[in-house]
Image (cartoon, rainbow, N blue to C red):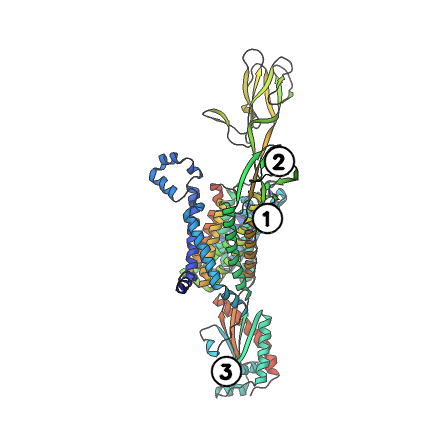
Amino acid sequence: MRNLAQRIREDLVTYRFAVAVIAVLLGASAAGWICSEVFPADFEHRRDMYVKLWGKTAVWLVDLFGLYDPFHSFWYTAVLALFFVVLLLCLITRWNRFIIRSFRIKIPAGTKALSKKLPRIEFAWSDLSAARGGGRDVLTHYGKKYGRHERADDDTMQSLFAGVRTVLSRKGYRVASRDGEGGILFSAVGGRWRFVGNFLFHIGILIITVGGVIGGIWGWTEVLYGRAGDLLPLGEGSESLRIEDFRIITTGRLEIRDYISRVSVINEEGNTVLVADIEVNHPLHYKEFDIHQSSYYVDEDEFRWARIEFAAKGRLGTVPLTVRPGHEIQLPGGDAVLSALRFLPDFRVGAQGPYSASATMANPALEIEVQSGGAPERGWLFLHHRRFNSRFEKTGSFVLTDIEPVLLTGLQIGTNPGSSVFLGGIAIATIGLIVLLLFNYRLISGAVGPEGLVIAGIEYRWKVGLERELGRLKGALQDELRGTIAGSRLH
Amino acid sequence: MHAADIDFFWTSFWCYLVSFLAYTVFVSLKRRSIGIMATVLFCVALAFHTAGLIARWWISTHPPFSTMFEYALTMSWLVAVAFVVILARFRRMVFGVIITPILLIVLVIASLLPKEASKQLMPALQSYWFYIHVVMAALAEGAFIIAAGGGIVYLIRYRGGDGADFYPSRDFLEEFISRSIRIGYPLFTIGALFAGAIWAQSAWGSFWSWDPKETGSLVIWLFYTLVLHQDIRGKWRGRALAVCAIVGFVIFVISFVGNLFFGGLHAYI
């Protein structure tokens, strides 16, 4: 058992494997993206038609791999599950590395750890002392030439290290040190919170995935349509939602500003529990239900009134008329009678004759009938395209100026038990990302010795950046330590 | 007044185009004076671009990113501003020869989109999440575009040949690309994905709908996640990183214009 755990840790929870899984998820998502555009969404319902178009084998393959709905297919679910498992295992097995790197500073065992291959800064106290006067110090120069080193005593070394610590702290480093090898060994770390940020971001992604899975399994949504006065069921319980009103608010230029449904929640006794307006972006949260303004619907043949301008044949001027469904109107100046026959919110003509192409007021048209003795005259009046209006030879001309359809509101009722988890994950991941963005991790180690200072850059994302950072540090350290050297004596 | 914004945008387009030509001559002849002239032209183009956005904001009475046309112009404006900042910081006019054609590509795409200014935001866009989502996504995508520009310069530098030393060093370019991606990635994650998901839940009742734009964003995010992980591992550095930055830009363009062909919940113009 232990061997298995160890093998999983060694083979499955490697950085390389995690990267491979991300690559596979990327490939699967890209494939799904393409499939969802290539294979039509109506595939399931028109399988026979596609068999004729593509052949049996192609349809069988599309069916087998669920290519018409790739993001709910078994292969994409399997890739997501693999991603989830690897992320979980990575976090379980590596959490301590993140935390340790954030809080513990490892001091080098000795000066040998400060490899010459690493970018480094190095200077002798004597150089600093010599540079103080601005010119070459004759004693120091010849002392070096003949192998004599000027050394700082313990007290001076402590003062110099205090200066090093001050400079590093000022630059945002946290310093840890210990005495060793006749000097002071130290490490300094900057931006260490980056690892906490990294950890939080990964945890956040994991929690978001969990929230998504919970919502996917136990959540549901349903869009229900209704007109004012209709009762819509609220889940499987005994409570219901009564639509009091639905309005589409438009601007003067007929641009839609808002959709508003006024609803009442009715309990099992038939009492109104609450009344609320539901708008787009302002859903109603009631108990575990989220109720959103989703869409609206205009039914064929349902309208409240239509306004028509009537110009009688051979007469000047027009007469406004208001037509209501099921009612007849006597036309002025004669015995002709007008009635509405059909209303289509989005008029089109197909093989079977006129029909409504959608449930929106895209091309409203009203069919009217005029009876004036003999055979009745029938024709269509269009709200937006008046030049296509039918002609009525016996009575005159009609123009449809306005029509009020009966609107059915579309309310999306649903529940998502994973939403709090999902939002929690987003919050944690966001904090992690902000920390990641703000902190730049860098680790340097060094030694303050009797003869001088050496600092090596251990870790930084970018080699040139590290060299630059060390260059800046060198300048700041020399400026700071010159004062200490000036007040001390080298032996 | 209603055409003023479009006039400004067209003027800025021509100025960017002339600036690009001037930068090309600058790179060919390596004459500093021509580079300075190209930069001045670029700044003039940016001024017109800014004026166009202000005019658009004035006309539509809301910030100019409610349509794809406006979004493309705002994003390209951010890229242009970022270029001026980079220019001021690093004094590398050679980036102009890369940034200007990318800007021109985005502006050409924008010119093909419907340009009508609507004073009324559609109901789904009337939310403060709209500003958070779109602004952060534009900033992130601007950073990815700049990374792609750096990638192209790197590849030119990598090929060497005459005048390769004229370009910034490879180390500098590598860090430039990496840093651009590392700035863009958190902004994209928080702005495009997280803020978008929260807003989608509020407006449409679902955090995620596998809409083409959402899927495109997921692909972009996974791609840069992969690039960053490889970068941390010490892989895909140098030339590979440059190629990745350019591939990322191509994926972004497909995702950006995709909803024109694919439809979906983001299919408003």
Q: Nearer the viewer, residue A462 or A302?
A: A302
Q: Are marks 2 and 3 on the same chain?
A: yes
Crowd rating for badge 2 (residues with CA inside 10 Å; few <14, some 14–19, many 20+): many
Q: Are marks 1 and 3 on the same chain?
A: no
Q: Are marks 1 and 2 on the same chain?
A: no
On screen, residue A275 versus residue B205, left or right, reads right
Q: Are marks 1 and 2 in contact (CB under 8 Å)?
A: no
The three-letter code of the residue at mark 2 reads Arg
Q: Nearer the viewer, residue B37 or A315?
A: A315
The C terminus of chain A sits in image quarter: bottom right
Q: Chain of mark 1?
A: B
Image quarter of residue A393? top right
* Residue A390 visible in this rendered orientation of the protein: no
Image quarter of residue A174? bottom right
- Element at badge 2? strand
Q: What is the CA distance from the residue labelled 1 to the residue labelled 3?
A: 59 Å
- Element at badge 1? helix
* Residue B218 visible in this rendered orientation of the protein: yes
The three-letter code of the residue at mark 3 reads Glu
Task: Please name the residue that numbered disc 2 is placed on.
Answer: A242
Q: Chain of mark 3?
A: A
Residue A138, x across and y down, in percent: 54, 87
Q: Residue A450 shows which numbered tag? A: none
